[in-house]
Amino acid sequence: MSAFIVLGAQWGDEGKGKMTDYLAEKADIVVRFQGGNNAGHTVEVGDKQYKLHLIPSGILYDDKINVIGNGVVVDLKALFEEIDYLEKEGVEVTPDKLLVSDRAQLIMPYHKILDGLKEKARRENNIGTTGKGIGPCYTDKMERCGIRVCDLMHREVFKEKLRQNIEDKNAIIRLYGGEVLDFEDVYAEYIVYAERIKPYVKDISVRLYEEIKNNKNVLFEGAQGFLLDIDYGTYPYVTSSNTIAGGVCTGAGVGPTVITGAVGIAKSYTTRVGKGPFPTELTDEMGDMIREKGHEYGVTTGRARRCGWLDLVILKSAARVSGLTSFAVTKMDTLAGIDKIKVCTGYKFEGKIIDYFPACLEDLAKCEPIYEEFEGWDESIANAKSYEDFPQNAKKYLKRIEEFTGIKVSIVSVGPERNQTIVINEI
């Protein structure tokens, strides 16, 4: 039995979709445990590219069970659009392949309206939300007025909760100058959704417990990344859920003692989207080159990502907080052809050298990166079939990651396709 976690070790967009798809070959079940359709995972299989937002990446295999856990916030309209998209691409999505937690919170139309109105009201202090209603949905969850998938299975319960919520939310929408919702319209729409989602709905905690007891291999797929965690990320420029390993227990209903390992996915450089300090950011031609060569544009939003040198302080922090047992390093091919490559190994802060990530953004903004410089490698790395085929300078680069973080590098990706994945150490 293996209950293994795949996490982003930076600001998201590290290549988790590809890595989950690759590791899912040996898994029986793939589980999403947090986030919503604000995530975007791109997977390439042969000459086809799939863009997933809510459904686990294991869906591209015919023999895997895919689970949307209770920690995920579910936009049913978006979920059904994704199912329809996959079906058109020849990927079967049936209630045998996809399970949805009865405890998952539902993103409702008023969440998306409020997300946009509140972001607009922040003006220059906006957070950079995707506008998908994620934050307002998690807010209602904690305020204990959210609507869950199980509520849809009881029409009168759902009707009463929806009526009360629309009345309350319309009052707030009016204050922001937005267009209010009609209860009957929303109710009619969601009653249709209720019938369609019903075959997929299960008690996920019970099912996963039984599968793990029966020695099935379970892969937990994280969305976003370590620095977008609501507690340990660059607050307030974060998502509204726990993206670290601890989020698996609460977001999927499994105990910590069943977790057997966690791999952190990290790009060979660093990227982030939106506002906030970024110690190793490159705002020059080098940053532009990495962005274009690495196709650094958001899957969900299309926004250009900010690019910078690899920050080992971030990876060390991610390893500590999530108890990572290995790293998977992606996009080594993007750095190919650069003569000199830099890596951040510490921050100079108020006259001291630190190797951890400060909580306060004002402190982080004062951190000056300390770099080590490496000789680059050539384009041949994209054709590597084994670790032995790697240029010597690429091996030195990977070795430094291991030395600094104390965590082994198990997998290296040298391109977007499944066969461009090199296993150094078996996970």
Image (cartoon, helix red, strand yellow):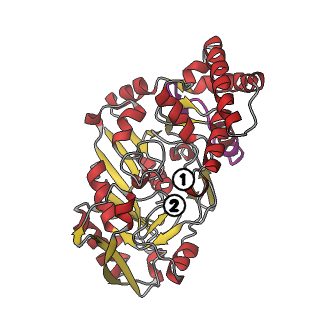
User: What percent of the width, then of the height, locates residue 364?
Assistant: 36, 63
- Cα–Cα span, label 2 and label 1: 7 Å
Looking at the image, residue 272 lies above or below residue 139: below
Q: Are marks 2 and 1 in contact (CB under 8 Å)?
A: yes
Looking at the image, residue 325 lies above or below residue 315: above
User: What percent of the width, then of the height, locates residue 189?
Assistant: 74, 27
Instruction: Determine crowd level at label 2: few under 14, some 14-19, many 20+ residues with C-alpha closer than 10 A.
Output: some
Instruction: Determine crowd level at label 1: few under 14, some 14-19, many 20+ residues with C-alpha closer than 10 A.
Output: some
Q: Which quadrant of the figure contains the N terminus?
A: top left
Q: Amino acid at mark 2?
A: Lys
- SS class of the residue under badge 1? loop
Q: Give the left or right position of residue 179, taking residue 94 as reference.
A: right
Q: Residue at the location (36% across, 27% down)?
A: 209
Depth order, front residue of 284/378: 284
Q: Amino acid at mark 1?
A: Ile
Depth order, front residue of 354/45: 354
For residue 109, which quarter of the picture?
top right
Q: Give the left or right position of residue 327, taking residue 202 as reference.
A: left
> Which residue in the structure is indicated by mark 1?
127
Depth order, front residue of 410/369: 369
- SS class of the residue under badge 2? loop
Depth order, front residue of 72/364: 364
> Which residue in the structure is indicated by mark 2?
275
Regarding residue 97, the answer to whether it shows in the image is no
Q: Residue at the location (41% across, 74% down)?
A: 309
- Give the residues drawn in magenta, as a range: 83-104
Looking at the image, residue 106 lies above or below residue 276: above
Farthest-out residue, top:
156
Magenta span includes 48: no
Find residue 213 and name its label.
Answer: none
Q: Residue at the location (63% across, 25% down)?
A: 168
